[in-house]
Amino acid sequence: RVKLCSVGYKEYEKLAKKFFQLYDTAQQQLSAQKHYDWGLRNMLAVLRSSGATKRANVKKSEELLMYQTLRDMNLSKLVAQDVPLFLSLLSDLFPAVSGAKKETEKTQIEESLERSVEQLK
C-alpha cells in the first residue's frame, strides 16, 4: 500500500489488495516452476514498474494501469500451460478492465484483418 501511494496511486488500498490476492492465488494454483518468483523481490519490481506506468499515464484509469503492469511483468515468465489461468485470475480481479480490453482487442483484430484484405486486393 505504501509503495503504491508513494508513486501516486489514489486507489492504493483496493489495488494493493488485488495485487496481493493475485500473487497469493497464483502461487497456490499455478504449476510449481523454479523460475517463478511471487516474493518481495518480484513485488518490488512490479511496484517500481507500476509507478513508472502511472507517471507516464496520469489520466488513465488506475485499475487499467495496474492490470497492464501485472500482466506485462508476469506473462513472459509463465509457462504456456499457466498463461490461461493467470489471465483468468487477472480478469476475475479486474472485471471492468478485462472486459474493456477484450473489446479493444477485437477492434484491433478487425482492423488488422481489414488491412490484410485490402492488401490482397
Image (spheres, helix red, strand yellow):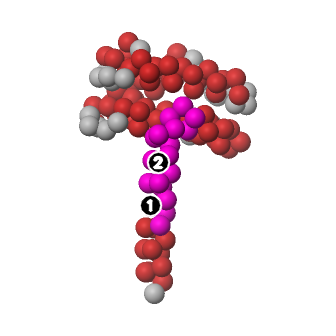
Image depth: mark 2 or mark 1 in front: 2
Q: Image point 51% across, 38% down: which residue? A: 95
Q: Image point 33% across, 17% down: which residue? A: 5
> Left or right: 62 with respect to 79?
left
Query: How many marks are shown on the rendered structure?
Result: 2
Residue 72 x, y percent position in the rendering: 48, 38
Tag 1: residue type? Gln
Q: Is residue 11 magenta?
A: no
Residue at image mark 2: 101
Which region of the structure is painted magenta? 91-110
The quarter of the picture where residue 59 lies is: top left
Residue 25 x, y percent position in the rendering: 64, 24
> Left or right: 32 with respect to 22?
right
**Quarter of the image that includes the C terminus:** bottom left
Residue at image mark 1: 108
Residue 35 x, y percent position in the rendering: 64, 28
Q: Image point 27% across, 31% down: which residue? A: 55
Depth check: give the residue in front, 91 or 77: 91
